[in-house]
Image (cartoon, rainbow, N blue to C red):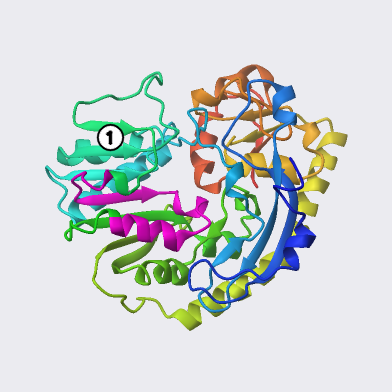
Amino acid sequence: MSTQRMESANSMATKRHPCPVCGHKEMSLFLELQKLPVHCNLLWPSQEKALDAPTGDICLSLCPTCGMISNVAFDPTLMEYAETYETSLHFSPHFQDYAEWLAKRLQERFNLNDKSIIEIGCGKGEFLSILCREGRNRGIGFDPSYDGNREGQEITSHITYIQDYYTEKYATKEVDLICCRQVLEHVDTPKNFLSNIRRTINDQGNTAVFFEVPNALYTFRDMGIWDIIYEHCSYFAACSLARAFTETNYQILDQYESFGGQFLCLEATLTDKPASSITDQLEQTKKVADLAFNFAKKYREKVGYWEQKLVEWAEQRKRIVIWGAGSKGVTFLNTVKGGEHIEYVVDVNPHKHGMFVSGRGQHIVPPKFLDDYQPHIIIVMNPNYLDEIGAMVRHLKDRPEIVSA
């Protein structure tokens, strides 16, 4: 990576960075991390390529006015969202249950029956398929990483997929609901992103919107340090998410946490003028600030704890596996020293099997691999899946110890 494209974290710390949501003139730096993988969800076909994967710096900064948190060292030109970008969680029954619940909620909330739905960042199309199936709706999914040749892909006549970004050139597309899940956190200029969507659907005043993002309060309150990744340049709490929408002429209908508090959801419609936030801005912002700076203090402690555990287990000749080859697993292996003692990462997504983890090169294997490997320790990257994983390994001859990262 050239020095022209990515400046060092120290250099970034000396610059003034305005808030990308409210425009406050300067954000406060509270956490610096260096040389983490640029992509956690872009896996590699060989260990050699994985070890040579590009890295970038993270400089998390807080806006004291709206509570927005941004990586001010983010370089959007490094992002690559192609067909090999793999984020699907729908192979997990637990996550699939959540997706079904959410689709049903949206169908009832917006009377989605025989309606037109656009999903921005539809991934491989799983959630859009559920939304359209539930209410016999028509769907258009936008995502550069969509793969129409994917094995097992559900193809239906009432859903169209476009390998492109949703822009004003698609303004003629009829839409009753805009759905956008786990996308806004990848955007370094969220107000511009929301304004562009607003302009694109401007003549369709009855359009509703639904957004889902990782919940920053959960990340910083519960020490979710493995959620700090380069791909996520924006971290939203309820206050900053509401501010971004109200300043771009959306009327917020509801905000709520979902998926065990890990996600933050927002439902809105269009309005002709900015509206007041439904959250207590000052109180929420102070809470975010307190959590963020406390998070920075405890970050090193948590990393140190896991480094010590890996040393202990290695001395005891324990076989260790990580369960979860998504962003949390990749970040753990690239952050904690001693990851070389872990050879394998388990994942239920068959499209990840045989691939290698960015930055560290661990081999990704299916759960069945454990029948022969018989690990002593399974480190589960997301506590939401503890019960599901426990049930999947209950048959193993030597019952492994299952621990949450």
Q: Is residue 298 visible?
A: no
Quarter of the image that includes the N terminus? top right
Residue 220 point in image, percent of width and height: 60, 63
Residue 135 point in image, percent of width and height: 16, 41
Residue ID for mark 1: 129
Disc 1 residue type?
A: Ser
Is residue 125 a member of the stretch shown in magenta?
A: no
Vertical comparison of 145 with 178: above or below: above
Is residue 180 a member of the stretch shown in magenta?
A: yes
Is residue 45 found left or right of 88 in the rendered image?
Answer: right
Residue positioned 36% across, 76% down in the render: 277
Residue 297 point in image, percent of width and height: 74, 67
Give neighbour class at mark 1: few <14, some 14-19, many 20+ (Cα, 10 Å). Answer: many
* Bounds of the magenta segment: 170-199
Q: Farthest residue in the bottom direction?
A: 282
Q: Is residue 29 visible?
A: yes
* Element carrying mark 1: helix
Residue 196 falls in image quadrant: bottom left
